[in-house]
Image (tube, rainbow, N blue to C red):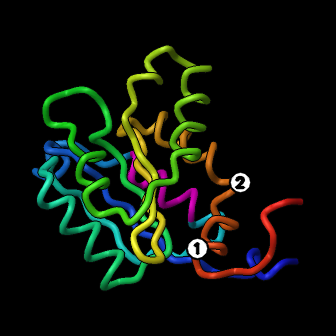
Amino acid sequence: MSAQQDEHYTFGVLTLSDKGSRGEREDTSGKTLMAILGDQGYKSVAYTVIADEKEEIVSTLTSWADELSLDLIITTGGTGLSPRDVTPEATIEVLDKEVPGMAEAMRQASMRITPNGMLSRGVVGIRGRSLIVNLPGSQKAARENLEVVLPVLKHALYKLKGGAADCGG
């Protein structure tokens, strides 16, 4: 087993939902993502539901990356076209660099399921040594999109932490 597979990476799930933040809707997508990642051996460190407010999203992402030093930050919600959907803009504001291939792969896989997949504006990128992944807000779409990137997540985090093994193979 390689060093990257032996690692136990930390993660947090940030759910963006106006109704969820007011207790008017249960967060099924965030809980589903936490269960999937936990089953994959990732260690849950942070979870919260906040409103679709750009400043609050920026503040949470920055804190989780810089202060908690989470390896992986997953967001769910706020990636569509409605006026309150600002997750990609908030994420881009905190990133050091983007990882467009992961976002493109998720959109491509979504479009095989529904043409509405092309409406997703989610981004993936790096802040410091944290990987931030925007997922859709619906439980079904969030799960489907996470499943697209799961095969490369541990290697991505390994490389982000300075791992020297080659990407090929």
Label 1 secondary element: helix
Labelled disc at residue 151: 2
Find the magenta span and give its range: 29-37
Prevalent SS, magenta region: helix
Tell which residue pokes out farthest to the top in this image.
Answer: 115
Identify which residue is drawn at 27% across, 64% down. Answer: 48
Q: CA distance from mark 1 to mark 2?
A: 16 Å
Picture coordinates of residue 68, whole percent (x, y): 35, 83
Identify which residue is drawn at 24% across, 57% down. Answer: 49
Identify which residue is drawn at 48% across, 77% down. Answer: 129
| Mark 1, other Cα within 10 Å: few <14 / some 14–19 / many ≥20 | some
Picture coordinates of residue 63, whole percent (x, y): 26, 77
Q: 96 or 136, which lies in front?
A: 96
The residue where tag 1 is placed is 160
Query: How many badges with numbers are in the image?
Result: 2
In this rendering, is residue 157 above or below 138? below
